[in-house]
Image (spheres, rainbow, N blue to C red):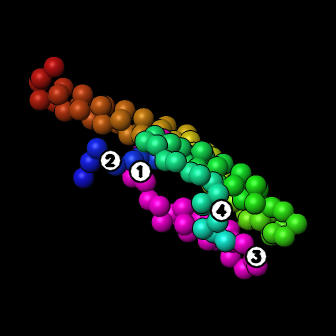
Amino acid sequence: MNKKSDLYILKRDGRKELLDINKIHKMTEAACEGLSGVSSSQVEMNSGLQFRDGMTTDEIQEILIKSANDLIDLENPNYQYVAARLLLLAYRNTYMENLCQRKVMCLCDTLLPQISNVECMINQSYQNFLMMNGTN
């Protein structure tokens, strides 16, 4: 359903996906897991994140990283680890996207010549068929 109020996020690969707040909650919760004196909801609230249609996943991650970084102080030093985990997640996602693109390119480099050869074989077979049936 595409309602006027729906917000779409632009993924790294160019796809648009309906905004899913739960993904953001899961990401911040994972970044805070096992750390004392930190709160995933505090990172989210401090970010002042205002979603807009067409916002990128990179923008969302950057805002959350800055939010966690801004919460670091003498009384809450563990937010440095939250910021680091969010940054590592962003790097991992970028790396995985680049890796997938390289694999696709490698696959294309491998398959395209084979497809071209099959195409030539089909074309030759079709030409032979036409010649044998007296059609040209």
**Label 3 is placed on what type of residue?**
Gly
Quick check: 30 above or below 93? Answer: below
Asked whether 5 or 106 is in front, the reply is: 5
**Label 4 is placed on what type of residue?**
Val
Asked whether 13 or 20 is in front, the reply is: 20
- Nearer to us of marks 2 and 1 is 2
Q: Quadrant of residue 119?
A: top left
Residue drawn 63% across and 54% down?
47
Q: Which residue is mark 1?
A: 17
Q: Which mark is residue 78?
A: none
Q: State the SS at label 3.
A: loop
- Answer few, some or many: residues within 10 Å of disc 4's Cα (few below 14, many 20 plus, some between 14 and 19): many
**Label 2 is placed on what type of residue?**
Ser
Q: Which mark is residue 37?
A: 3
User: Could you tell me residue 85's position as x and y percent?
Assistant: 73, 63
Horizontal side, residue 17 vs residue 129: left or right:
right
The stretch of residues the image draws in magenta is 13-38
Q: Which mark is residue 43?
A: 4
The alpha-carbon separation of the residues under discs 4 and 3 comes to 12 Å
Q: Earlier in the sequence, mark 2 or mark 3?
A: 2
Residue drawn 12% across and 23% down?
135
Q: Earlier in the sequence, mark 1 or mark 3?
A: 1
Inspect this view and state whether residue 40 appears. Answer: yes
Q: State the SS at label 2.
A: loop
Residue drawn 72% across and 59% down?
68
Horizontal side, residue 24 vs residue 114: left or right:
right
Q: Which residue is mark 2?
A: 5
Q: Earlier in the sequence, mark 4 or mark 3?
A: 3
Q: Is residue 37 magenta?
A: yes
